[in-house]
Amino acid sequence: MENKTLAVLLDDVKGGHRLSGKEALSLFKTRGRQVWEIAEAADVVRENRAGNVITYVRNQNINVTNLCVNACGFCGYSKKPGDEGIYFHDRAAIRKKVALARERKVTEICTVSGLHPDFTTKSYTDVYRWIHEAAPGIHLHASNPMEVAYAAKKSKMSTVEVIEAMKEAGLNSMCGTAAEILVDSVRKKICRQKIPTKEWVRIISEAHGLGIRSTATIMYGHCETDNDRVKHLAILRDIQDETSGFTEFVPLSFIHMNTPLFKAGQARAGATGREDMLMVAVGRLFLDNFRNVQVSWVKEGIKMAQLGLIAGANDLGGTVFEESISKGAGATNTDYLDPAEMERVAKDIGRKLRRRTTLYELV
Ligand code: SF4
């Protein structure tokens, strides 16, 4: 792209122009110092839309089981019957973890797990009730469209009925995971047992329609093309136009080391720094109906996450406290990020750190 053309396009976007798919594609293909120009424009848009505060939430993960009927190629976490290291947290174990979360002044508990062969809708709703019993008032950020579809199939219910049952049991917001790349040809390569794009879109929209808001994610840096990324972002933007149900966009950089996909030579060794930065920046510029863009320190490490915060992001995610999924795929230092370190990182780029709730109210 000509420098002038890029400058004009970025000025237009800053002035409110909605990026087309073709324009977003040209931004993803940018190399060299023009990457900084895109990051700078995204940072300006971030400031206008979300202000100068960097937010985070005190949260804790509870991965209920790592036993899973699926075998996604990018997953280094799930186990099959007979494997070593299988776990399932029962009521007593979950209550213990929730008690610990309360001691840590956590406001959000997040549960996503493997698709246990014996799970039904009741298995999920039981877990949600146990969590609320042990920590009344805590925000439960749980499930995702794949878990909803699985529970529906196992319990012979509609997906709307499953979401209603989950809501009744205390589900407060939904994880926008299992999206990976919302292009079926890519899904066939990386997670062929997962629900197709159309079903993911339908279920997340149903959740929004029932008053359950969700995050929106993309998992990139494996075998998708720039064009696939654009198609994915366009789907998220269309859903947001319809429902306004997404709380934030969270780019998830592929952790490759222990994954079957990488070991089989079917994926590259994750995104580069340029790609990580552009995913945040182009996400911010393209998703003009999202207020919040989060950087994942779990996936990118805190140094790259800090750069994302001056390339369009306004949120650092959560303290986490316990993390198994990225660790299973080969990531290190994923268990806990001290707000004192978040504060240091925020101050270093001239911004203030503030704690928030899951739904982005400042605490
Ligand atoms: S990504 Fe989720 S659904 Fe896929 S194998 Fe791993 S735990 Fe199972």
Image: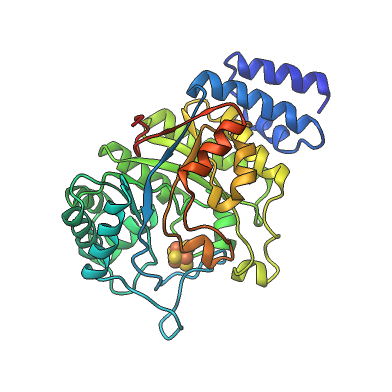
Colour option used: rainbow
Q: Looking at the picture, how far across and down is residue 296, in whole percent? A: 53, 46
In this orientation, does residue 193 appear? no
Q: Looking at the picture, how far across and down is residue 78, in whole percent? A: 46, 71
Please give the name of the residue rendered at 71% of the width and 33% of the height, measured from the top-left corner: 27
Vertical placement of residue 52 versus 266, above or below = above
Please give the name of the residue rendered at 43% of the width and 57% of the height, measured from the top-left corner: 195
Vertical placement of residue 71 versus 106, above or below = below
Q: Is residue 210 left or right of residue 318?
A: left
Vertical placement of residue 251 versus 353, above or below = below
**Quadrant where the C terminus lies?**
top left
**Within the image, what quadrant is residue 190 found in?**
bottom right
Q: Looking at the picture, how far across and down is residue 133, in whole percent? A: 16, 55
Please give the name of the residue rendered at 29% of the width and 58% of the height, measured from the top-left corner: 100
- Nearer the observer, 327 or 264: 327
**Within the image, what quadrant is residue 162 found in?**
bottom left
